[in-house]
C-alpha cells in the first residue's frame, strides 16, 4: 500500500485499536515496559476493557482507553489525551484510585490489592518544565519510604518529544514509541518497517494502516478526529460561564491557542509555540483559528 498512512495513532479510536485489541498484546506490553521499567517486567496481559468496534457504533462511554491486568495481578490503565485541561492531574488520580479499589470483591481483604499503574500519554503540555516523563508514587516525604503495591501515575508529554526519524533508531524504547505515536501517520508502511523492525512496531503499524482499508473503521476514525474539535469548543463554552471578564479573556486565549495547535497538528502544519501565539491580539488568534478550521473542512470535504 503506497502513500503515507495518514491515520494518526493519537486519535482515541486508533489508539484503542492498536493497544487495546486482543491479539495486539505485544504492542501494549512493549509500551508499558518502556515506561514503567519494572524490576519484574510484564510478560503477558489480560484486557479488562478489550477494544470493540461495536462499542463505538453503540456510542458507549469509554472512561479510559486501555485497562489490563498481568499474570502477577498488577493493573494497568493507559489513556491518550489530546485536550489537556488544568484539572487533568486530579482526573488521573481519580481513575487510578478507581482502578485500585475496583479490585476488591465482597469478602476480600485489603492485603489482596495489587499495584495499579496509570499511564497518561499527553499531546499537550501539562507540567511547566522540559521533562518528558514524570512518575508519581506514594512516598514518605522525609525518609523516602514507599507504600508498596499501591498507586503510580506516569505522564508522558508527547508535546515535549521532538526526536527525528534519523536518530530515533538509536533512542530508548520509550523514545521510539513517542516518535511512532506522534509521527506514524506521516510515513508509509514501508518507511515504518525500516525505522522500527521490531515485531511490536510491525504489529502496531499493521493495525494502523488497516484502519484506512476498512470503510466502517475509517468512518469511525474520521468522526472521532472531528469530535476532538467539538470537545474543545464545549470546554471553551463551559469555562466562559461565571468568569469575570479579565480572567475570562485569559482563559479564552488559552483555549484558543490549544485549538490552534490541535488544528495545526491535524493539518500537518508546523506548530506555533504558545509564547508566539499569546503575543497576538485576541482577534488575531480567533481569526487564525477560524482560518485553520476552514482549511480542515475543505480538506475533509
Image (cartoon, rainbow, N blue to C red):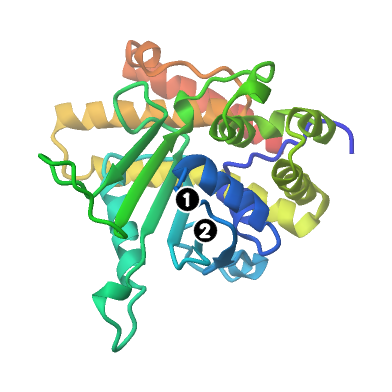
Above or below residue 218? Residue 250 is above
- Residue 194 is situated, as x and y percent measured from the top left of the image, at 80, 29
Q: Is residue 67 above or below residue 81?
A: below
Q: Which residue is mark 2?
A: 66
| Image location of residue 238, percent across then percent down | 29, 47
Please state which of residues 235 and 201 is positioned toward the viewer in this rendering.
201
Quarter of the figure with the N terminus? top right
Q: Position of residue 291 (x, y in %)?
A: 54, 23
Q: Tell me if label 2 and label 1 are in contact, CB under 8 Å.
A: yes
Identify the residue at the far right of this view: 1
Residue 76 falls in which quadrant of the image?
bottom left
Near-viewer residue (196 or 217): 196
Q: Residue at x 27, y 47 (%)?
A: 137
Question: Does residue 285 appear left or right of residue 90 in this picture?
Answer: right
Residue 215 location, quadrant: bottom right
Question: Residue 290: image x %, image y %?
Answer: 50, 27
Mark 2–mark 1 distance (CA, rounded to whole Å): 6 Å
Residue wearing tag 1: 79
Does dot 1 land on a helix, a strand or a loop? strand
For the C terminus, the image quarter is top right
Amino acid at each position: 500500500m503506497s502513500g503515507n498512512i495518514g491515520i494518526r495513532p493519537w486519535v482515541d479510536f486508533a489508539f484503542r485499536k492498536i493497544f487495546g485489541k486482543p491479539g495486539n498484546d505485544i504492542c501494549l506490553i512493549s509500551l508499558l515496559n518502556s515506561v514503567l521499567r519494572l524490576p519484574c517486567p510484564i510478560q503477558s496481559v489480560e484486557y479488562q476493557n478489550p477494544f470493540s468496534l461495536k462499542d463505538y457504533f453503540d456510542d458507549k462511554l469509554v472512561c479510559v482507553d486501555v485497562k489490563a491486568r498481568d499474570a502477577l495481578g498488577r493493573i494497568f490503565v493507559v489513556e491518550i489525551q489530546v485536550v489537556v485541561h488544568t484539572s487533568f492531574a486530579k482526573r488521573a488520580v481519580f481513575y487510578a484510585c478507581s482502578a485500585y479499589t475496583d479490585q476488591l470483591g465482597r469478602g476480600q481483604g485489603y492485603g489482596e490489592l495489587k499495584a495499579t499503574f496509570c499511564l497518561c500519554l499527553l499531546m499537550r503540555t501539562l507540567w511547566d518544565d522540559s521533562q518528558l516523563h514524570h512518575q508519581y508514587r506514594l512516598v514518605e516525604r522525609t525518609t523516602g519510604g514507599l507504600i508498596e503495591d499501591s498507586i503510580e501515575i506516569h505522564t508522558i508529554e508527547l508535546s515535549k518529544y521532538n526526536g527525528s526519524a534519523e536518530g530515533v533508531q538509536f533512542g530508548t524504547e520509550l523514545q521510539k514509541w513517542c516518535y511512532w505515536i506522534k509521527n506514524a501517520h506521516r510515513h508509509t508502511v514501508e518507511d515504518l518497517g525500516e525505522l522500527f523492525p521490531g515485531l511490536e512496531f510491525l504489529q502496531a503499524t499493521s493495525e494502523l494502516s488497516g484502519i484506512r482499508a476498512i470503510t466502517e473503521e475509517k468512518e469511525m476514525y474520521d468522526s472521532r478526529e472531528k469530535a476532538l474539535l467539538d470537545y474543545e469548543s464545549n470546554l471553551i463554552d463551559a469555562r466562559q460561564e461565571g468568569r469575570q471578564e479579565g480572567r475570562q479573556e485569559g482563559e479564552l486565549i488559552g483555549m484558543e491557542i490549544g485549538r490552534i495547535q490541535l488544528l495545526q497538528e491535524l493539518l500537518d502544519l508546523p506548530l506555533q509555540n504558545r509564547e508566539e501565539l499569546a503575543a497576538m491580539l485576541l482577534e488575531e488568534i480567533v481569526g487564525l483559528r477560524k482560518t485553520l478550521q476552514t482549511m480542515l473542512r475543505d480538506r475533509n470535504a
